[in-house]
Image (cartoon, rainbow, N blue to C red):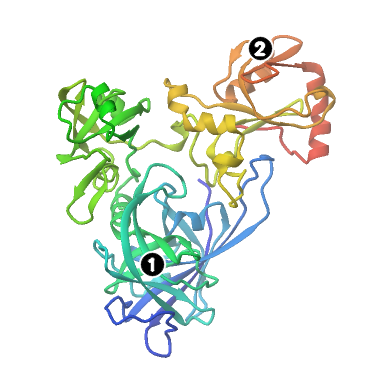
């Protein structure tokens, strides 16, 4: 396992008039505890370049704050520590330094736990307890640090609770929406929020124009910490099916709905998911989950948050391995199923939704760059400046969006030709790219490993590469391909012409 390293600065803080620089003051009780440990986290690393998968992008640095919780662990967002390669801990009070490791990371829920290599490093520092559920109208306080170590306190109002997509774009998770005027600090990549002296959440995203912050809430953090305390972290359960509302009476009539009261229409099911294994079918109407009724919009009545999307029952209120009763209607006939919840690892998707910390796989064959299609590759098209679904090649976005409908059997990836490097063997092909590979020398290509086997044993004088899109067929001379290898390495700085599992 690759070791991960960070720079952490632990500061025990006592709040007083001289130590607080408030951006906004409110008389209601949302103040931070009288004494708390904030951990300054500085991350240096390099992300991989998916357009040139044999190399990394320019080094980056990130800075944020983590919450010191029980067992000497530090809670941060997963985004803060992704693709890092250097770690060091430093206590401000005595200058002691120490390496740290990442114990648990969940990119889907955007949470991670760090530990100093020696637990004695945090001895004497107070910890931050986890708050319970916060509700609309509560005041939450964001905590930041000045470069001098002075505490900056900014108070905001919780205005909404809903399910939103997190950065990894896998399912939806509970989110607090907070109205708060947050000022930039150089450690603002991760910001803890407290309520009544306890940790209420971590910053997920912030829009400075509307001054609205989305927050990873304490209930989601609690789920993560409880799972992380076990012998093996299971992650959050995958929903495993697509659905849409049943407000349209014609849709309900088409589906044979008899109750005409509520439920959502199942429009697609992932292979090998808990939904498929339980016997859910396309066209079913889900009316009840875990004995909670689902309305026509897909909401259930939560005892704390009122109306919420029902997928919250399967993610936040349940754990991997739990058995959840689900009531459905199938062509007007009521039925009951039982889901045994499971987590789908990113590598089990046809198009993996995220790929952090791991090097992308590729093969350079005669100047053609072959890769497996991933959402991480698609995200490179926006480079954080826009929407990758608009900027990336439309064909690849389509394959990602409808992967289960197009490949219902699963158990495969999609191999693409991302671009063509000019070489003697690729004359006439150098302006091509963004092609989906179907077969090479008659063999179906479901993974890069399939292509690697054909490349080692072509069984003839040519590589015949069949693609979904025009030109449909690309032919490479095997001998010329071998002869071009040294020139490709030298011209493009490619140390190895392939990287596989």
Q: Under tag 2, what secondary structure?
A: loop
Cα–Cα gap, marks 1 and 2: 59 Å
Task: Choose mark 1 or mark 2, whichever is in front.
Answer: 1
Label placed on residue 392: none
Q: In the rendered view, tell whether residue 386 sits above or below residue 52.
A: below
Tell me the crowding category of disc 2: few under 14, some 14 to 19, or many 20 or more residues within 10 angstroms, Cα based: some
| Disc with the residue nearer the chain's start (1 vs 2) | 1
Nearer to me, 439 or 160? 160
Horizontal arrangement in the rendering, residue 121 relative to residue 389 (left or right): left
Horizontal arrangement in the rendering, residue 74 relative to residue 185 (left or right): left
Nearer to me, 301 or 43? 301
Q: Residue at x 36, y 60 (%)?
A: 177
Q: Percent x, y for residue 403?
A: 47, 28
Task: Work out which quarter of the rendered image holds the C terminus and state it.
Answer: top right
Q: Give the residue number, with chain letter if any, for mark 2.
A: 441
Q: Percent x, y for residue 242?
A: 35, 32
Q: Residue at x 81, y 31 (%)?
A: 422
Horizontal arrangement in the rendering, residue 389 relative to residue 305 (left or right): right
- The answer to whether residue 172 shows anywhere in this view is yes
Q: Give the residue number, with chain letter if any, for mark 1.
A: 179
Q: In the rendered view, tell whether residue 169 sits above or below residue 367.
A: below
Q: Residue at x 58, y 24 (%)?
A: 449
Q: Under tag 1, what secondary structure?
A: strand
- The answer to whether residue 70 shows anywhere in this view is no
Q: Are marks 1 and 2 in contact (CB under 8 Å)?
A: no
Nearer to me, 228 or 260? 260
Q: Residue at x 20, y 25 (%)?
A: 257
Tell me the crowding category of disc 1: few under 14, some 14 to 19, or many 20 or more residues within 10 angstroms, Cα based: many
Q: Percent x, y for residue 108?
A: 41, 46
Q: Percent x, y for residue 274?
A: 29, 30
Q: In the rendered view, tell whether residue 356 sits above or below residue 256.
A: below
Residue 430, quarter of picture: top right
């Amino acid at each position: 396992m690759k070791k991960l390293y960070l720079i952490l600065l632990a500061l025990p803080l006592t709040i007083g008039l001289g130590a607080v620089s408030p951006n906004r003051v409110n008389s209601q009780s949302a103040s931070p505890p009288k004494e708390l440990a904030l951990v300054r986290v500085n991350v240096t690393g390099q992300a991989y370049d998916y357009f040139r998968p044999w190399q990394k992008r320019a080094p980056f640095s990130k800075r944020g704050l983590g919450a010191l919780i029980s067992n000497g662990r530090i809670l941060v967002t997963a985004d803060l520590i992704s693709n890092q390669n250097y770690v060091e801990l430093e206590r401000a009070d005595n200058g002691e330094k120490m390496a740290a490791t990442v114990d648990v990371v969940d990119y889907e829920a955007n949470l991670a736990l760090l530990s100093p290599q020696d637990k004695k490093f945090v001895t004497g520092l107070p910890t931050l307890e986890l708050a319970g559920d916060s509700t609309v109208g509560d005041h939450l306080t964001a905590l930041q640090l000045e470069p001098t170590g002075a505490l900056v306190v900014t108070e905001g109002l919780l205005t909404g609770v809903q399910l939103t997509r997190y950065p990894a774009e896998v399912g939806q998770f509970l989110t607090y929406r907070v109205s708060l005027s947050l000022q930039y600090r150089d450690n603002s990549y991760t910001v803890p929020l407290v309520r009544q002296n306890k940790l209420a959440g971590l910053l997920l995203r912030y829009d400075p124009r509307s001054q609205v912050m989305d927050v990873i809430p304490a209930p989601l953090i609690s789920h993560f910490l409880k799972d992380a305390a076990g012998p093996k972290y299971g992650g959050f359960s995958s929903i495993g099916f697509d659905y849409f509302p049943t407000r349209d009476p014609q849709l309900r009539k088409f589906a044979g709905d008899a109750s005409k009261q509520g439920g959502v229409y199942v429009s697609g099911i992932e292979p090998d998911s808990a939904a498929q294994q339980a016997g859910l079918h396309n066209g079913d109407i889900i009316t009840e989950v875990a004995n909670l009724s689902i309305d026509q919009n897909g909401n259930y009545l939560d005892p704390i948050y009122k109306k919420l999307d029902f997928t919250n029952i399967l993610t936040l209120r349940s754990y991997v391995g739990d058995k959840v009763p689900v009531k459905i209607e199938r062509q007007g006939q009521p039925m009951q199923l039982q889901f045994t919840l499971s987590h789908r690892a990113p590598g089990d998707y046809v198009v993996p939704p995220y790929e952090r910390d791991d090097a992308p796989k590729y093969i350079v064959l005669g100047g053609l760059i072959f890769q497996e299609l991933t959402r991480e590759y698609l995200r490179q098209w926006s480079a954080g400046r826009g929407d990758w679904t608009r900027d990336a090649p439309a064909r690849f976005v389509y394959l990602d969006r409808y992967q289960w409908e197009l490949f219902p059997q699963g158990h495969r990836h999609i191999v693409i030709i991302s671009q063509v490097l000019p070489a003697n063997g690729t004359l006439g092909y150098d302006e091509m790219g963004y092609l989906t590979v179907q077969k090479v020398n008659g063999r179906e290509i479901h993974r890069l490993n399939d292509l690697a086997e054909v490349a080692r044993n072509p069984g003839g004088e040519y590589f015949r590469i069949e693609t979904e899109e025009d030109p449909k067929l690309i032919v490479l001379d095997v001998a010329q391909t071998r002869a071009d290898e040294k020139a490709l390495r030298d011209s493009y700085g490619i140390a190895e012409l392939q990287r596989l599992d």
